[in-house]
Structure formats: C-alpha cells, structure tokens
Image (cartoon, rainbow, N blue to C red):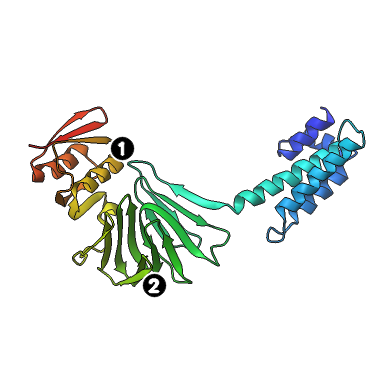
Amino acid sequence: MKRDELILKWLNNELNKQELEAFKQLEEYNDLIQLDRSLQAFKTEDFNTDSELNKVLTTIKSFKKSGKSRISVFMRVAAVLAISFSLYYYTTTLDTTYTTDFAEKTLIELPDHSSVNLNANSSLVFNNKNWNKIREVQLNGEAFFKVSKGSSFEVKTKSGVVTVYGTEFNVKHRKQFFEVICYEGLVGVTFNSHETKLKPGDSFLILDGKIIAKEKEKELEPSWLNNESAFKSVPFKYVVSELERQYGISVVTDNIDTNQLFTGKFTHNNLDIALKAITLPLHITYSKSNDIITLTGE
C-alpha cells in the first residue's frame, strides 16, 4: 500500500493490524505521532481558530512561492489535522438549534438540566458554550419550561422577553399572538419596555397588538403536553392555525367569521374528532380532500 494511502487511513482511524505495522515503518511516523499528540493537547479555551488556520494557509503559500510543486506528506497531514481541529472547535461554539415540524413535539434538556417541551412548528436557540455565564434562549413558537435554580434565565421572542424568577411556565409566540402563563414560581414579562410580574395561575396575553385580560389558569400544566389544544375566548383564526400545526394540514375557510371567539379544545390524536370539536359549537361543516380541509359556515 502506498504511503499516502496509509496516512489517509490512519487519519480516518481505518488501519488494520497489518497496515498499522506498515504505517509504523514510515519515515514520517514519529513526526506524525508527535504532531497528533501536540494537537490533542490544545486547550479549547485558549485555541485561536483563525490564527491557527492562517498559519497553515501561510505555510502552504510559502511552499508554492519557493517553487516546490508538491507539498510534503508531513505538511499535508499537518494541514489536515490543524484544519480538522479548527472546524471541530468552530462547530462546538456555534448556537444550538432545535426545531419541530408540523405535528411534531420534542423534549429538550438544557446544559443546566432545565427542560423544555417544544410544541409543533417551533424553534429554540441557545449558546451551549456560554451557558454558565448567560442562561438565555430564543423562542419562535411555543414551549413549556421547567427551569433549574441558578443565575438569571431569559426567554427572548420578537414580541417580548420573559425573565424567570420561578421554575414552570409556558410561552407561546406566534404571528400576532404572544402569551405567557406562569404555573409555578414567579415570571416577569417585558413588553414595550414595561415588565409585568406573573404569579402561579397568572397569564399575559397579546392578541393583534392588544393586551387581553384573562381568567386565572386552573390547570397545573398546559394542555398541549397531553396532546390537547385548549382555548378560552380566542379568535377562531388562531384555533384553525393551531389545528394546521398539530396535524400538518391546510385549512380553507368559506363564509366564516374567523374573528369570532371560540372556547373549547381539540385532540391531537384524531383529526375527525378534532374537526367535530371545533366546528359543531359554531355550526360549521367541513369536508376533506387529501391534506386540505374546507370549513364552511351556514
């Protein structure tokens, strides 16, 4: 086997016993092992990715300028190892992003063992590397949080910021819909530079840019964790949007006032039952064609 092939297989951890013995006989063996150990000894906190990558590129350019048509195997391996390490370091310091599709939910454990249940068609972003310094997440969609004790914890949305003084709360941020419900502890909601403190059972709701007063929440957790969506005096258009998210369907309305208020709930496990739950109270009929549902008013 050629020298280059042996080194490549060594880099990929693919050498068998016979090939390993052949690799050990290479002239560059000791230099390669020493280089590998040196790179592994780097401490990520002190490793400057851009600086090390520039060193490799500068070295490669100097070989080209000196008239050498082929970079030595040693230098090529050094470049591969340094660049690989740089890419590893870079990717581990990026933000961590979780997303859910239509009709999908997921449970996320944050670095401090706080938990987040992410509802359908939602996204959550946080920085794992800086978590011990800044406990902060960005939310688009809906999520239920159980926050471990520690430093300040914030949930940022485009509509407002939720600051945690307690442990259990639900945040829902959709188009023209922003709601925070506190289930345990104390939660602060900052909207238009004003903070509102929520105690267990308190809610903060913004619909179409207006603050809406709500009754005390009596449930111990949001209904969607148990595969149900519940509504209290909510415009019907938001009920329809949630149905689309939970079932991955498209809904068309015909001769329906989508701003009329709806109180009720629907299941996430049976589409026909869900459709009956939202149409019967409003005297609406429905028809299905593939993944398109048509709701028709009287």
Q: Quadrant of residue 23?
A: top right
- Left or right: 55 with respect to 47? right
Seen at 71% across and 36% down, the residue is 14
Q: Is residue 251 left or right of residue 129?
A: left
Please indicate, yes or no, whether residue 26 appears anywhere in the rendered image: no
Q: Amino acid at mark 2?
A: Tyr
Q: Residue at x 42, y 61 (%)?
A: 155
Name the residue tied to disc 2.
Answer: 165
Residue ID for mark 1: 248
Query: How many marks can you see?
Result: 2
Instruction: Give coordinates of residue 230: x percent, y percent.
Output: 21, 53
* Residue 190 in the image: above or below residue 57: below
Which residue is at a point 22% across and 40% down the rendered structure image? Answer: 270
Image quadrant where residue 292 sits: top left
Looking at the rendered structure, which numbered label has been put on residue 46?
none
Q: Nearer the viewer, residue 24 or 119?
A: 119
Q: Quadrant of the N terminus?
A: top right
Q: For the residue carrying disc 2, how many other residues have a C-alpha within 10 Å: few (<14), some (14-19), or many (20+)?
A: many
In this image, 294 relative to 42: left or right? left
Place of residue 212 in the rendered image (x, y in percent of width and height, measured from the top left): 22, 62
In terms of image quadrants, where is residue 73? top right
Please determine whether, in this image, residue 68 is positioned above or below residue 243. Answer: above
User: Which callout, 1 or 2, points at the residue further toward the start of the chain?
Assistant: 2
Residue 220 appears in the figure: yes
Q: Nearer the viewer, residue 10 or 81?
A: 81
**If the image is split into quadrants, where does the C terminus sit?**
top left
